[in-house]
Image (cartoon, coloured by chain):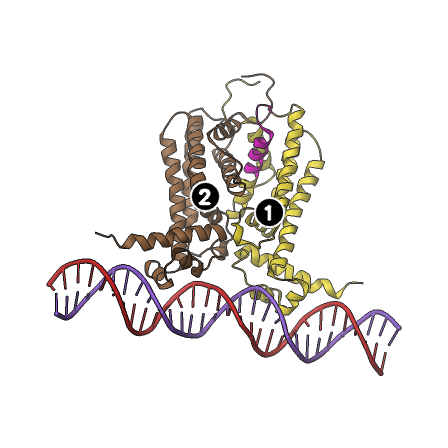
Chain colours: A yellow, B brown, C purple, D red
Amino acid sequence: MAKAVPDTRKLILRAALKQFANAGYAATSVQQIVDGAKVSKPALYYHFADKAGLFQALVHEAHDERYRILREAAERGGDIRAQLENILSALIEYFAANRELLRIAFSTMFAAPGEVPEDLSCDKKCERNFEFVHTLIQTAQKNGELDKRFDSRELAFGFYGMANFHLVAQLVMPDCQTDKKTAQRIVELFLAGAAHKPRKK
Amino acid sequence: MAKAVPDTRKLILRAALKQFANAGYAATSVQQIVDGAKVSKPALYYHFADKAGLFQALVHEAHDERYRILREAAERGGDIRAQLENILSALIEYFAANRELLRIAFSTMFAAPGEVPEDLSCDKKCERNFEFVHTLIQTAQKNGELDKRFDSRELAFGFYGMANFHLVAQLVMPDCQTDKKTAQRIVELFLAGAAHKPRKK
DNA sequence: CCATAAACTTACCGAACGGTAGGTATCGCA
DNA sequence: TGCGATACCTACCGTTCGGTAAGTTTATGG
């Protein structure tokens, strides 16, 4: 029976998430975290090896959550349009309710190399997440659902780029509402293209 | 005649750019900058009010350069396809040669609020840059070049998202070559859409 | 030939940093 | 009742931080 344990550890994680999301890794002090969690500093160092280890725990959670969302949404099946719509609206919905995790995920994706702990191996997780979408698109391309003129990687870049930009926008401009309908229109834009078509089909 | 001035100031700016790009704002110390520039700390504080002021100078340069690139590329005219191609390939080309400035621009765009000096008013510059592209797209839409079913803002988001994602990719994976041809294919993807079309027109 | 101001220098400040040494309360278990 | 393990605590460490006070050199103009 582990009962007395999780309280403090989770308290620390929650406070750290808030602080890191608000100020980034380097600008957040361990003192701020323990103040926020209302624990002592050695309590933090009892549960985590160091500041970097605490941060890593959160980073991995963020990327793994993202991966889980991706997989669950894609498994709901349907054609590529339905899959992309599901993925995008699931990401939007989840991260609307978990803005801090989203912030952590992006700030490690785009961070300068020295801004974040050295051994933070999130490259692999970022790549894994991207490759999941890439594979989805590759398959759809082989099935004839997507235009074969494009390189599958370019297609994945295109979709991932549009999707991430909207997610970031949600972060930067919180009042800019982004919902299921938005997700549908983004996918429509990705699939149909922006150009005006004089004749259909 | 100001002659003796620019040497030290530019030395500091160059060293600061490198350091900030490599480690972000918070994780870069003033000491590292002055060591890199081979000047003394008070020499830095003679030319800049404080660490934040030095950073601001670089941020504004980064965003203004980006704006300049956008305008110059758009002014070369042509239809919306040519304009977007010009913009994208100009951005890719410029930032391939100025990776540090690109890093500064992105790390301030996506930074957590507390990671960067408070009064750093780059929101306006980011918005200005985005709105320039937005206006371009709006005009093209009115001219009938772009599909009127989409909201102009969504179109701009889509293009800006794709474009920025490729620029970021260039940052994260330096060996991933991105050139004029890539720019053309990205624009083609944006305009034509990813979906397979059984019949043309 | 000296006054002034620009462009620095050496030497240092107090505060905050990440992290720890060493002691303590509380538990299950023998 | 005792003994070790867990889960902390207070107090403090050495280092580095951003920033500055006060003195020095150099160019210029009167």
Whether residue A104 is visible, yes or no, is: yes
For the residues labelled 1 and 2, the Cα–Cα distance comes to 32 Å
| Residue shown at the point (62%, 67%) measured from the top left | A38
Q: Chain of mark 2?
A: B
**Mark closer to the observer (1, 2):** 2
Give percent across and percent down for residue B161.
51, 37
Give percent across and percent down for residue B197.
59, 20
Give percent across and percent down for residue B80.
43, 27
Element under disc 1: helix
The magenta region covers A147-163
| Residue shown at the point (59%, 48%) measured from the top left | A105
Q: Which residue is mark 1?
A: A96
| Residue shown at the point (43%, 60%) measured from the top left | B30
Horizontal relation, residue A146 to residue C8: left or right: right
Above or below: residue A35 compared with residue A185: below
What main secondary structure does the magenta stretch of the protein show?
helix
Of residue A15 and residue B141, the one placed in the foreground of this image is A15
Horizontal relation, residue A133 to residue B117: left or right: right
Whether residue B142 is visible, yes or no, is: no
Q: Which residue is mark 2?
A: B99
Say whether residue A124 is magenta. Answer: no
Above or below: residue B60 compared with residue A40: above
